[in-house]
Amino acid sequence: MAYFIRWHLPWLAMMGLIFWLSSIPDLSQSVFVFRLSDKLIHFLIFGILGWLTARGLNRCRVEGIQEHYLLFAGIMVIIFAATDEWHQSFVPGRFADWLDWLADTLGIIVFIFAYSRFKQT
């Protein structure tokens, strides 16, 4: 149980938080202080999710996943980002935006790469 809490609960909880935030209709625009600040938020939030997922899968006990944790983490989180945008298309006042997904994907790739370079062995 301690293994799950330490390595997998953080990225699963982050996915839950993102899903919950995506379910809020008419999310206030007051958070966005400059023109592309929403893209920066997408980049950072999904980047953190990518980092946490890579961290968890790097310690995964399932054969084959730990060896290719970067690939698995990247694919999983990029697909999650796409489904999150799709999910938003069903929420009143929200819409799917491919530029948000692109910002998500760039954040994921940058943060997963950073994790691979700076992780403790």
Image: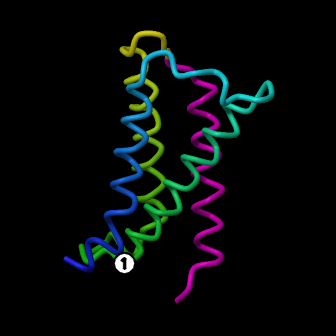
Q: Residues within 10 Å of mark 1 (few under 14, many from 20)?
A: some
Screen quadrant of the N terminus: bottom left
What residue does disc 1 label? 59
Residue 112 location, quadrant: bottom right
Provide the secondary structure element on which disc 1 rests: loop
Front residue of 91 and 103: 91
Q: Position of residue 114 (x, y in %)?
A: 65, 67
Q: Which residues are magenta?
A: 96-121
Amino acid carrying label 1: it is Arg
Q: Is residue 23 left or right of residue 103?
A: left
In the rendered view, would you say 86 is above or below 119?
above
State whether the magenta stretch is mostly helix, strand or loop.
Answer: helix
Q: Position of residue 101 (x, y in %)?
A: 56, 32
Q: Position of residue 67 (x, y in %)?
A: 40, 75
The residue lying at 37 percent from left, 75 percent from top is: 66
Residue 64 located within the stretch drawn in magenta: no
- Going by the picture, which residue comes out furthest to the top? 92
Front residue of 95 and 63: 95
The residue lying at 54 percent from left, 47 percent from top is: 46
The residue lying at 29 percent from left, 71 percent from top is: 5
Q: How many marks?
A: 1
Residue 115 located within the stretch drawn in magenta: yes
